[in-house]
Image (tube, coloured by chain):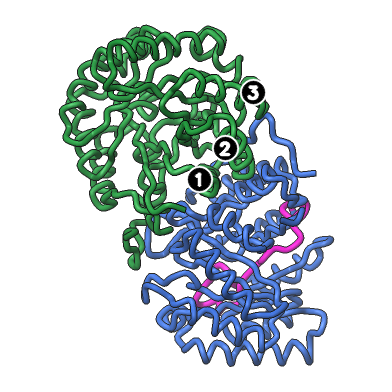
Chain colours: A green, B blue
Amino acid sequence: MPHSVTVREVGPRDGLQLVSNVMSTATKMEWITRQAAAGFDEIEVTSFVPPKLMPQFSDAVEVTQAANQVPGLTVSALALNLKGGIRALQAGARVVNFVLSASEAHNQSNVRCSTEASLRALRGILDWQWQFAPQACVTAAIATSFGCSLQGDVPQTQVCALAAQLAEAKVAEITLADTVGYANPRQVKRLFQAVATEVGDVPLAAHFHDTRGMGLTNVLAALDCGIFKFDAALAGLGGCPFAPGASGNIATEDTVYMLETMGLRTSIDLDALLRLREDFARWLPEEPLQGRLGIAGIARNFTPAA
Amino acid sequence: MPHSVTVREVGPRDGLQLVSNVMSTATKMEWITRQAAAGFDEIEVTSFVPPKLMPQFSDAVEVTQAANQVPGLTVSALALNLKGGIRALQAGARVVNFVLSASEAHNQSNVRCSTEASLRALRGILDWQWQFAPQACVTAAIATSFGCSLQGDVPQTQVCALAAQLAEAKVAEITLADTVGYANPRQVKRLFQAVATEVGDVPLAAHFHDTRGMGLTNVLAALDCGIFKFDAALAGLGGCPFAPGASGNIATEDTVYMLETMGLRTSIDLDALLRLREDFARWLPEEPLQGRLGIAGIARNFTPAA
């Protein structure tokens, strides 16, 4: 194992996605700024989806521009179609993370088109980026890589074939996402190993949900096969639309804590992160906070990874 | 990895330990009976501690005797001193699980004597068992094996030395317990591997808490080094006396689910277990239920390990 691991905060995007109360741009920026100051190099700050569909992200341009002023921060934004991807690049996103689903049923439900059509949109964004935003990069996340609440099983060959197409399209990074919390550690190892052989030197990352309690076990399994970049959301914000009350993203603070106790350096200041979590609870009083560390506190014998 | 794993339910003991409302003997027996029917071979049904100190277990004898009538169930009971161990054997416990702490500070705080004095008590129980209860067995759990909220770090050499003494005393099984939720997966691997070389052919088991979110990751790490018996509590019952609201034991249903999704057979009927969890919530309306599976439900593509 290497000595350092990257935790990418996705709370301002994946976390807020299911929150009905719109968070003000100023509060989002306090969150992003403080989390960057706590040591996060990359934050997915928003989603370029139609504001009519998701009022939570109607300030996508403003947030992207303001986040670009935060020293040392790589600003990442999500896109689901050609228009969103180009808008994100125009707004100055350093990373556009394009999401498409391995499950056809999920892709249709999520963006009302086939996975193949999503792939064409991605190629369009890549073309645009090469021509007009050479300083940026486009990454891709394969949603429902580990199973789908609509389709059920998602065959490994389906995920591998899509990953190969993404690599061929020259995305800068591929994330395998457990969108609905179906992954188990054995499957994580199998799939990451299989995908790694398909994508050459394209870096891989992991996006796990803790819906069924296996979020961190899946991180552990991915670490074991050489994955060193993980998405997480502060306080595990972001539930599951199909299971009210269920948890969504793995909690950033728990993820960082596990990595650090294992001697894997994240360069994140846990105390600062836990202070942010306390304020965060006041900003979203109606949201149940997930994550254990915020309740139990850091162990008295804890020392950060050297 | 082998094909099957044992999950030992400890909720009626470790879970109820911190519950101030005394559960009736009848309700305890409904819990134990239904959980046995769901496929649990061994349940830690009670604790033989002075009733004055823990009114929750004043029915220890009745529960032990009644549980012995449950078909196919191996009845386990906890003891912390000589008197408790002999009472448990006299009541008919098939397994007496003796707990002592690797941390001197924790042993003093828990049972007001040194670890060495606890070890003498254990030897006394073993003597009594060999003479008067040959059908039973005595196991030992090393509390604070992975760190202590009083002492801080617990050196690996300290745990190994104690495990060696337990093996020499001929206990039937040794459990390494993360009493305060300090363990991380890397440490779990290191310690189990080190202890395994000390104890010869004495079987090892693991008792993890999920206090800081790493409970199931520690199960995964222990599986990786050949541990195939795990304690867990239904709905993660049993908090942490030092962190109000924090979670304690790993949740049985989440543990079983993870193992089964990984192809490791537990012989447990998850649907029956989740039905029991629902009734359980009504029996203990004031206790926060932990565990994710009970909220999110079983994935639609789940198939139990064959």
Kind of residue at disc 1: Gly
Q: Which quadrant holds residue A30?
A: top left
Q: In screen coordinates, is B244 left or right of A114?
A: left
For residue A285, above or below residue B223 = above
Q: Which label is found at residue A192?
A: 2
Q: Are marks 3 and 1 in contact (CB under 8 Å)?
A: no
Kind of residue at disc 3: Gln
Residue B113 position, x and y percent, is 47, 88
Mark 3 vs mark 1: in front = 1
Determine if the magenta segment contains residue B41: yes
Q: Are marks 3 and 2 in contact (CB under 8 Å)?
A: no
Q: Relative to the observer, which residue lies in front, A163 or B81?
A: A163
x 65%, y 21%: residue: A151
Q: Earlier in the sequence, mark 3 or mark 2?
A: 3
Q: Which quadrant holds residue B129?
A: bottom right
Which residues are drawn in magenta? B34-58
For residue B259, above or below residue B206 = above
Chain of the residue on which disc 2 is drawn: A
Q: According to the image, label 3 marks what residue?
A: A158
x 37%, y 60%: residue: B243
Kind of residue at disc 2: Phe
Q: Which label is found at residue A226?
A: 1
Q: Are marks 1 and 2 in contact (CB under 8 Å)?
A: yes
Q: Are marks 3 and 1 on the same chain?
A: yes
